[in-house]
Image (cartoon, rainbow, N blue to C red):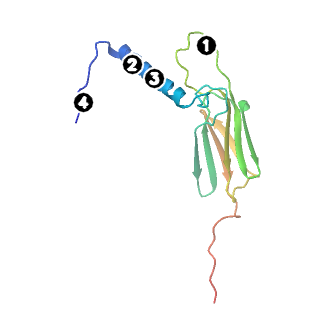
Amino acid sequence: MTHPVRHGTGGLPSAFRELEDLRTRVDQLMHAAFPGGTLLHFGAAEPWAPLADVEDTEEAYLVELELPGLDKDQVTVEVAEGELDVHGEIKEKEHTGVVRRQTRHIGQFDYRTTLPPNADTEHVSAELANGVLTVRVPKTEKGKARRIEITG
C-alpha cells in the first residue's frame, strides 16, 4: 500500500519546521525514557568516543579516528599494557550569531581499544591529516599464526 504524497503550501521552510517539531518530540520521548539525564547528548560535557575504523592489514593495524578541526597539539595518543588510548578535547568555538542547533561533539573525548597480542607497541606511529587521525600499529612475528608440521 502506498501513501499519497502531501504537498504543503509552506514549501521548504515548512518542511524544516516539521522536522524540527519531530526532533523536539523525539527528544521529549528520550528524556521521558531516560529520566535523570542518563542519556548523553551531542555537545554534552561528558567524554565521548570519536567515530573510528580499525583495519587489519598484512603488516599493521590501522586505526582511523574522525577528529575534524583539531590540531595535533590537541590530541594525545598513548599505548600502555596492550591498550591504545586516544584522548583530547574539542573546545566550543565562539559564535557570533544565535545557535539554533548544535549537534557537533564538543568537550573531552576518549577512544580506547585493546590491541592484539601481535601488536608491536614499541613502533606505533600517528598522523593527523584532513581531520582524520591515523594510528599505525605494526604487527610482530610473535602471535602470528604459523603452520605446525605433524610428525609420527
Q: Amino acid at mark 4?
A: His
Say the numbered circle drawn on residue 18: 2
**Badge 2 local density, few (<14 within 10 Å), some, or many (20+)?**
few
Mark nearer the viewer, 4 or 3: 3
Can you identify the residue that label 4 sits on? 3
Disc 4 + disc 1, Cβ < 8 Å: no
> How many angstroms separate mark 4 from mark 2 (CA)?
18 Å
Separation of disc 3 and disc 1 at Cα?
A: 27 Å
Against 127, is 23 above or below? above
Residue 94 locus on image (x, y percent): 64, 15
SS class of the residue under badge 3? helix
Q: Is residue 124 visible?
A: no
User: Quick one: 30 or 59, which is closer to the camera?
Assistant: 30
How far across and down, in percent of the image, does residue 3 sit? 24, 30
Identify the amino acid type marked 2: Glu
Q: Are marks 2 and 1 in contact (CB under 8 Å)?
A: no
Q: Which mark is residue 25?
A: 3
- Crowding around mark 4 (Cα neighbors within 10 Å: few <14, some 14 to 19, many 20+) is few
Name the residue beneath numbered marker 1.
Answer: 95
Earlier residue among tags 4 and 1: 4
Local SS, label 1: loop
Graded by Cα atoms within 10 Å as few (under 14), some (14 to 19) or many (20 or more), the crowding at tag 1 reads few
**Amino acid tagged 1:** His
